[in-house]
Image: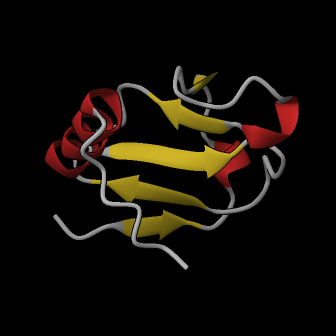
Amino acid sequence: MAEHLIPDAALLSGWRKSSYSGPNADDCLEVQDGHPTGVPVRDSKNSHGPATVFAAASWGAFVSAVKDGTLDGGVG
């Protein structure tokens, strides 16, 4: 499944703060469990902004890489 956007993430209910978000309220990702096509992810500061829906396998691989420290930080 290719990732896709939900233009207004506030239309979905059941968001929770990702357990790997930073301790500050400004550094939070929220995810929604139980979505039928994947894992929606949004910026908690912008609840009416877009959410990106990732394939469950892609999201799982990302979370695993964060947990085990193998995420390649090649951004920037």
Image color mode: secondary structure
Residue that appears at 60% across and 35% down: 30
Q: Quadrant of the N terminus?
A: bottom left
Q: Quadrant of residue 2?
A: bottom left
- Image position of 74 (left or right of 42): left
Q: Residue 45 placed where, x, y %?
A: 84, 46
Q: Quadrant of the C terminus?
A: bottom right
**17 up-or-down from 72: above or below:** above
**50 up-or-down from 46: above or below:** below
- Image position of 22 (left or right of 72): right
Q: Residue 21 placed where, x, y %?
A: 61, 31
- Image position of 27 (left or right of 9): right
Q: Quadrant of residue 36?
A: top left
**32 up-or-down from 2: above or below:** above
Residue that appears at 32% across and 27% down: 67
Figure disc tally? 0
Q: Quadrant of residue 51?
A: bottom right
Residue that appears at 32% across and 67% down: 3
Q: Residue 60 placed where, x, y %?
A: 22, 37
Residue that appears at 60% across and 22% down: 16
Q: Residue 54 placed where, x, y %?
A: 32, 54
Along the line of sight, which residue is nearer the eye, 75 or 50? 75
Along the line of sight, which residue is nearer the eye, 36 or 73? 73
